[in-house]
Amino acid sequence: MIELAIDTPKVTVEPAFVDIGMTVRGGTNATGQRVDRPGGHYRAGVTISLGTATQRSALISDLVRGKQEGLRMAFPLQGVDQSGSGAPVMDGADQAGRLINLRALTVGYVIEKGFWLSIADADGQHYLHNVFAGDTVGADGKATITLAEHLRVPFADGAAVHLDQPMIEGDVEGNEQAWRLSRADRVDGISFTIEEAA
């Protein structure tokens, strides 16, 4: 897994939710029945403009390798300050659905609706999630929150939860990775799409 460290403010990210569920309609196009299935995940289209030739070369190298091994990068929080959460972990093994229990949070920390978090499994793979209903951390350092989407894997008790800086991790889409060189010997904005594998 290649961890992409982007040291530039010139980054455009276009996130999207990939819904695995569907609405089933009858032959007469009557009222539909929603079939909600676990497995919804995220992808992000990213365009990066880097200033120095060294930065551009390093990014291209990371993307070529990431195409083969997978890529992980910080998910942009758009100026929302999620810092100070402590060192949260999953409180209990094999949690399922949308409701999750956390522990080892900073007492009094407020998890707001719309916050992002990623949960790392035993192999270190991150799964990105969005908070639908938050909570204020109690004196015991615990909180219960509701996610916007279902958990995709049964995490172990104590699995790390990244609230301060969540990560998106997955495959770089497509069968090739391309970039455009200009006549001024510089690489124009480099674009790629990363989609969670699970």
Image (cartoon, rainbow, N blue to C red):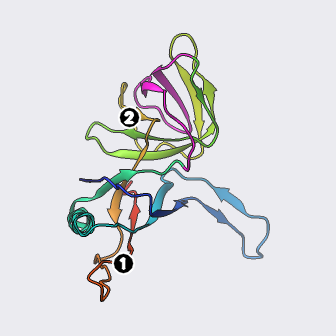
Q: Is residue 153 magenta?
A: no
Point 36% across, 70% down: residue: 173
Q: Which residues are magenta?
A: 78-107
Is 130 positioned to the left or the right of 44 in the image? right
Q: Amino acid at mark 1?
A: Asp
| Nearer to the camera, 16 or 122 | 16
**In the picture shown, does residue 185 fall above or below 130?**
below
Residue picked out by circle 2: 155
Question: Which residue is located at x 31 percent, y 79 percent?
Answer: 179
Q: Is residue 94 magenta?
A: yes
Q: Tell me where residue 24 sits by quadrant.
A: bottom right
Measured in 3D between alpha carbons, the distance from the residue under mark 1 to the one under mark 2, in whole angstroms, is 41 Å
Residue at label 1? Answer: 188
- Where residue 26 appears, x then y in whole percent? 72, 70
Q: Main secondary structure of the magenta part?
A: loop
Q: Residue at x 48, y 27 (%)?
A: 84
Q: Earlier in the sequence, mark 1 or mark 2?
A: 2
Disc on res. 35:
none
Q: Amino acid at mark 2?
A: Phe
Image coordinates for residue 72, horizontal then vertical, percent? 33, 53
Tell me where residue 45 appears, x and y as whole percent. 46, 67
Asked which quadrant contains residue 174, the reply is bottom left
